[in-house]
Amino acid sequence: MGEEVTAQSYSREQRQRYREKVRQNLDVFERMLAQSVFEFERPMTGMEIELNLVDGDYRPKFANAEVLEEIADPGYQTELARYNIELNVPPRPLPGDSAIELEEEMRSSLNAASAAAEKRGAHIVAVGILPTIMPEHFEGEWISANNRYTALNDSIFYARGEDIYLDIEGPTGERVATYCDSIAPESACTSVQLHLQVSPQDFAAHWNAAQALVAPQIALAANSPFFFGQRLHAETRIELFSQATDTRSIELKNQGVRPRVFFGERWITSIFDLFEENVRYFPALLAEVSDEDPVAKLEAGEAPALAELRLHNGTVYRWNRPIYDIVDGTPHLRVENRVLPAGPTLVDVLANAAFYYGVMRKLASDDRPVWTKMSFAAAEQNFHSAARDGIESRLYWPGFGEVRAEELVLRHLLPMAHEGLAEWGVSQKVRDRYLSVIEGRCTTSTNGATWQTDAVARLQERGMDRQSALAEMLRVYAGHMHSNDPVHTWPLP
């Protein structure tokens, strides 16, 4: 959910002071990269999963405060809308059977949370976009009771100066084209974020590798085909999030001003490149100023919090975001991968994570890395193609040319994932369990998006209208989700 803030609006003086403090933080961060000790000897991984609440009819249930009170677990927090919650998974190392142990712990946690939610008349569903969400659901009190979200909503519209226009068209011509007077549609985008701790000198290689990898990730994992009742992109979440948080007017877009949901524009040589871009190109949305003197803290031999720089970084929505954080007084750096949708099952989520961590290990350590053989523009084009067409997309990859996503994964990336996980010290048992799920999706051409699309089509062929078919599909989806069988094995209704 990001750090909470104390105010819902900010004065001109506060914004000016905040800008000055962010620039001071950036200067201190540059000094730290040159002279400070960062924790990376025992790299940790982490995960966040955003979830939806639905009622007995599988429509959104706006009751996250009541559900969280019933769950009573600090690992669960609010998200943007009152039908969203988030599960934060404690960091852990990759080696051994850690992933299987994590799966068991998370299943137990989610089962307990689901039982608690049902006491408040809600079901928990993990899906990239809730298929039953409709415009009328945002006409009431939709936003969570949290200063950060209200301040973000107000700041985005203040910066934009007009309503947001959503315009997304699917492959068969179905389209959503509508104006919105809040960022409520952004709440429909529920994702999984993967974290990987890296050293300062290795950060650029890992970020570049992650940027090259986003397209295969999305192609394999797409799970967001429906929005406002229309069948749009395989991973509609990508385009919806980009449009729903856009602070630019049409004129600023025409001038080439960068969007806050930002793929990037070049391969990098240092993590500093990304933080410096954030400060140079993006005005503040939240202007919370701390009392910390980062220069004095650094000169006293302590790691400064750099609260303003971190807050600003949290409002620039890169698909691979740089993270600076402190644990037990020692700073560290992470790559936060934000492209994956939630669901369909926990085993699918962990399969996506295993594929990512394994391939990342190999790509980042390659003697002639992929980003030296592929233009950044080609990586971005792959990204958009994968979001639009999912597992059926065609992607460019050096040495293969343009190839179907399934073929690229089976012939090249899946073997790399096995090797990379082995180099991490991950057990054979873990590799077999999760990477076999990735292989199964490729050999059956099935992921969450294809299953949802085929299920709704089948229900409509039986005479259901679209809204009824979406609700019934989601009911069946939720049942399969609780079975924890991977999505490529699910029968159609």
Image (cartoon, rainbow, N blue to C red):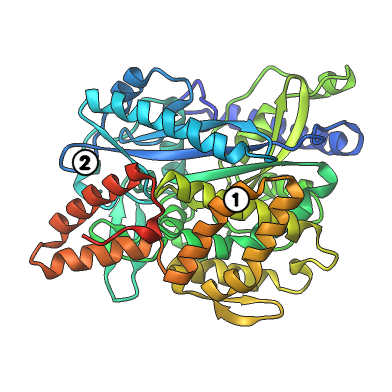
Q: Is residue 200 above or below residue 176?
A: above
Give the farthest residue toward the right: 35
Total marks drawn? 2
Q: What is the three-letter code of the residue carrying label 2?
A: Glu
Identified at 31% across, 46% down, the residue is 181
Quadrant in which the C terminus appears:
bottom left
For marks 1 and 2, give the one nearer the viewer.
1
**Alpha-carbon neighbours of circle 1 within 10 Å: few (<14), some, or many (≥20)?**
many
Q: Is residue 253 above or below residue 346?
A: below
Q: Is residue 327 left or right of residue 409?
A: right
Res. 260 in view: no
Q: Where is mark 1, residue-wise?
A: 354
| Element marked by disc 2 | loop
Q: Earlier in the sequence, mark 1 or mark 2?
A: 2
Q: Is residue 306 left or right of residue 407?
A: right
Q: Where is mark 2, residue-wise?
A: 139
Residue 253 coordinates in the image, percent (x, y): 51, 63
Identified at 46% across, 47% down, the residue is 347
Residue 393 coordinates in the image, percent (x, y): 48, 74
Q: What is the three-letter code of the residue carrying label 1?
A: Ala
